[in-house]
Amino acid sequence: MEHFIALVTKPDNVPIVAILFLIPYFIWLSYRQARQTDKTGVPSDAHLNDKVYVWPYLCRNEFICAIIVMLVLGVWSIMIDAPLEEPSDPTKTPNPSKAPWYFLALQEMLVYFDPWIAGVVLPGLIIAGLIAIPYIDTNPKGKGYYTIKERPFALSVFCFGFIILWIVLMVVGTFLRGPGWNFFAPWEAWDPHLVVPLTNVNLSYLFGIRDANTANFFGFVVVAGYFALGPIVYLWKRNTSDFLQELGLVRYIVVSFLFLTMLALPIKMILRIFFNVKYIWVSPWFNV
Amino acid sequence: MNEERKGLKEKITNSDIWRSIFRHGYENTGRRYTLQILQNVWLHLHPPRISRHALNFRFTWCMGGITFLMFLVTAVTGVLLMFYYRPTAEYAFHDVQYLEFDIPFGMLLRNMHRWAAHGMVISVMLHMFRVFLTGSYKKPREFNWAVGVILLLVTFFLSFTGYLLPWDQLAFWAVTVGTNMARATPVLGHEGPFAPSDITQSNDVRFALLAGTIVGPSTLLRFYILHCVAVPLLASALMALHFWRVRKDGGISGPL
Ligand code: HEM
């Protein structure tokens, strides 16, 4: 427990602790407005649509906001000193070695995927996916006000990605990962000699496949089948779903691909944690 | 009483001393408010008038503005830090120590720079979250959202390049871990899938980033230049574009 308290109060972890309060606060703040909008059917701020002069009304707000933020920053800077450890030494590797806190969700993904996926392909797709959002979300409603009812799909996908896959993984990486990147609950002491037996096996092994070539083919079928879910749903639903018709084929392909890729992370996490699955597809060139 | 006060006020504002300092009075008129914005070099990026709901904290959370404020704080404190810091493996760590122990307010300066940088990362993430929740990326703001995503990356990169500069164990290993994944870049990293045989650890993407096969003195210099010159310039240019587009896209989004 003591080491956990030490970890939480570490100067560089202050931002994460702050996030733990800020995110719920802002979710609550926006949820209240969304609920009001959804109940009345009118955007909660729709009556505030007249124009006001920026000077003094907006400038005053900006000024007050800047003063408050500078006060917080000033107190923070007086109370808590930036860390400075021993001089760098390439021969002394700390255990665990952690990236800066805002990259810990990415480092956490390394547990479940090989570096070329967790460190390169997935971050690339996150960026591409974020940029694509306005172009694939064709729903014209819910622009400029908080609402849940008018865009449930977009909201739940984004919130799942942002809150669970980004913020929560970041917090886990910061507070619950110890030596050897092993998982330690807050009340457990960090044991640098802890050896976790590697009992993970590949998915093909679970299905009784022992031959490398068959395993390779099996993995390919599973992964290809997973991503084929997108087109299959399209063929199945295209005539009956207004949503699909409005989206169009190209947008649908992008949406389903990004969506399935995002879900691949929690799926792999569940397979690893509960079924000890190491790889889904082992090929001579790469492993998934 | 009121009459008396008015008379006194008039007396003061009509005195020669007052009028030598303030050239004319301030009328509370719309024309005056508009000129105040148009004629001020710091404020002229604002429109003269905005929709009332955009003033609400509960709508914007002020997060875009706070991100910008944090950027300004890091820019000012960062320039001050540059007076005391030399980006070489011999000096870097000791310059930071010297700054902390021997320079008046040196520790405070370093703290403000570091915490403002962390604050900027927090506020930029929250800003993106709010822009998503209010659906503000929708037509006609698609492109500004894309500019925002690049700004998000630039913010991470600014913070990451700065993380190395104290040249202590924390800095060294955080950057080592953070750049290790580049080895596994498909095709371009020497440990990545499909890497051609002439991609080695001394010519792959990680080498380009680190200027070496491990984090070393040339990495320090490279990150210093990126951190103090290249990335801030890029960020400033993108922010100018971002703010300009907020205005050209019709100001802050709203229900109407
Ligand atoms: C260095 C980083 C950034 C700065 C300084 C910045 C600053 C601002 C400011 C001052 C505004 C005015 C409204 C507000 O305060 O909310 C704004 C609006 C906006 N920002 Fe950013 N921003 C940054 C990053 C981002 C990111 C990461 C995104 C999204 C991925 C983004 C997307 C937008 C959009 C779409 C608007 C228009 C919002 C509306 O009309 O309601 N920005 N930004």
Image (cartoon, helix red, strand yellow):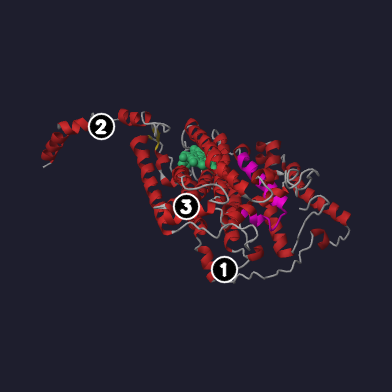
Write down the residue under mark 2. Answer: B26
Q: Which residues are magenta?
A: A105-132
Q: Position of residue B135 (x, y in %)?
A: 53, 41
Q: Quadrant of residue A235?
A: top right
Q: Amino acid at mark 3?
A: Trp
Is residue A33 visible in the rendered image? The answer is yes
Whether discs 3 and 1 lie on one chain: the answer is no
Q: Position of residue B95 (x, y in %)?
A: 50, 52
User: Cα distance, mark 1 to mark 2?
Assistant: 61 Å
Residue at the image point whose x is 63% and y is 43% from the top:
A127
Label 2 crowd (10 A; few <14 / some 14-19 / many >=20): few
Residues marked 1 and 2 touching at CB (< 8 Å)? no
Write down the residue under mark 3. Answer: B115
Residue A119 drawn in magenta: yes
Task: Specify whether B80 is left or right of B163.
Answer: left
Along the viewing direction, whichever of A66 and A256 lies nearer the viewer: A66
Residue at the image point whose x is 89% and y is 58% from the top:
A211
Write down the residue under mark 1. Answer: A186
Residues marked 3 and 1 touching at CB (< 8 Å)? no
